[in-house]
Image: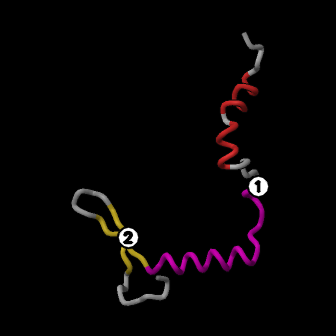
Amino acid sequence: MSDEGFVQKFMRATDKLRLVFGPANRSSTTHEMTEENRRLLAQREAESQQWETLTRPDGSTYVVPKNPDDRSLR
């Protein structure tokens, strides 16, 4: 019989997962964006404008390039 508490049981059960995935990230989401992050966000938004989502008759969706001749990101 074990006098192990819930936290110890949880940590032992998730030990192998933490070995694979590493510790959880605990950074704040309320800080101001840096200039580098603003540039990256603008770049990602521009990249996403090159694609459009099409819907099949069965309701599933897929993404295709708006201009098939544009090879800038591929």
62 on left or right of 17: left
42 and 69: which is toward the camera: 69
Secondary structure type for disc 2? strand
Q: Which residue is under mark 2? A: 63
- Going by the numbered disc 1, the residue's amino acid type is Ser
| Numbered disc 1: secondary structure | loop
Image-quadrant location for residue 17: top right
Q: Residue 42: where, in percent of width, then height?
A: 61, 79
Q: Residue furthest top?
A: 1
Asked if the magenta segment contains residue 26, the reply would be no
Residue count near mark 2 (Cα–Cα under 10 Å), binned few <14, some 14–19, many ≥20? few
Residue reaching furthest left? 57
Q: Magenta segment range?
A: 28-50
Q: Is residue 12 above or below residue 30?
A: above
Tell me what residue is drawn at x 73 percent, y 77 percent.
36
The amino acid pointed to by label 2 is Val
Residues tagged 1 and 2 counted as in contact (Cβ below 8 A): no
In this view, the residue in front, 29 or 20, is 20
The CA distance from mark 1 to mark 2 is 32 Å
19 versus 45 height, above or below: above
Report which quarter residue 16 is drawn in.
top right
Q: Residues within 10 Å of mark 1 (few under 14, many from 20)?
A: few
Q: What residue is shown at x 71% (from left), y 30% (from top)?
A: 12
Quadrant housing residue 60: bottom left
Is the stretch drawn in magenta largely helix, strand or loop? helix
**N-term mark: 1 or 2:** 1
Q: How is the image coloured?
A: secondary structure
Q: Residue at x 32, y 69 (%)?
A: 54
Queried whether the magenta region covers residue 33, the answer comes back as yes
Picture coordinates of residue 23 (x, y %)?
A: 73, 48
User: Dot 1 corresponds to which residue?
Assistant: 27
